[in-house]
Image (cartoon, grey):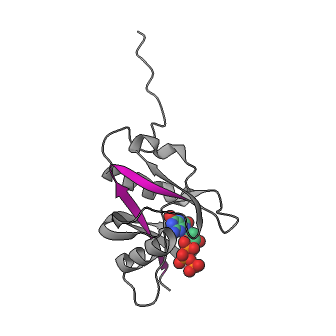
Amino acid sequence: MTDRVVVAGAVLDEGRLLAARRSAPPELAGRWELPGGKLEQGETPPQALVRELREELGVETEPGERIPGEWPLAPGYVLQVWTARLVSGEPRPLEDHDELRWLYRHELDTVDWLDQDRPAVAEAARHLPGGPPFPGPVTEVPADRS
Ligand SMILES: Nc1nc2c([nH]c(=O)n2[C@H]2C[C@H](O)[C@@H](COP(=O)(O)OP(=O)(O)OP(=O)(O)O)O2)c(=O)[nH]1
């Protein structure tokens, strides 16, 4: 059986990425994600994304390009991510989220992303200008003291 797609938006505005803190279910509440949701029957991922961002955030958006990759979620579900541009409205946490934050590239590590979202966020970060890569450097190269 093919996995069901959850489509999420890398919503980009003024060089920042929109992060959303889940309010439910309990095992995901408090962690940050890219807003979106499950595809409904007959929808393409970009159509589902526009609908979900309207329902959850009260904004109109225009999907851009697919971010390469597909990430496993709960069994039977995979995450796909599209960039999206704000067309109208100011995002508000109407459904599924209790806080939203616009993050510059150098701020991406300041929220507690869902583990399964981190590779997707790393890919999305390529669409943001400047700053260090996300996640930050894992090892530091010691200074040459010789
Ligand atoms: N939207 C979204 N969901 C994610 C991400 N990462 C992740 O593990 N998930 C999980 C959380 C949920 O179990 C599932 C998506 O469900 P959802 O609750 O957002 O979808 P929906 O709006 O269609 O909800 P519903 O119809 O089932 O109520 O995928 C992510 O980045 N964005």
Is 21 on the left or on the right of 52, as rendered? right
The residue shown at (49%, 79%) is 3
Asked whether the viewer can see residue 74, the reply is no
Tell me, yes or no, whether the highlighted magenta stretch contains residue 16.
yes
For the view shown, which residue lies furthest in the bottom direction?
42
Query: Secondary structure of the magenta portion, mostly?
Result: strand
Asked whether the viewer can see residue 28, the reply is yes
Where 60 sits versus 130, above or below? below
User: Ligand 1: which quarter?
Assistant: bottom right
Residue 66 lies, in percent from the top left, at 32, 67
Q: Which residues are magenta?
A: 3-20
Where 49 sits versus 126, above or below? below
Residue 46 lies, in percent from the top left, at 35, 76
Tell me, yes or no, whether the highlighted magenta stretch contains residue 77.
no
| Quadrant of the image occupied by residue 144 | top left
Residue 93 lies, in percent from the top left, at 54, 64
| Quadrant of the image occupied by residue 67 | bottom left
Residue 106 lies, in percent from the top left, at 42, 40
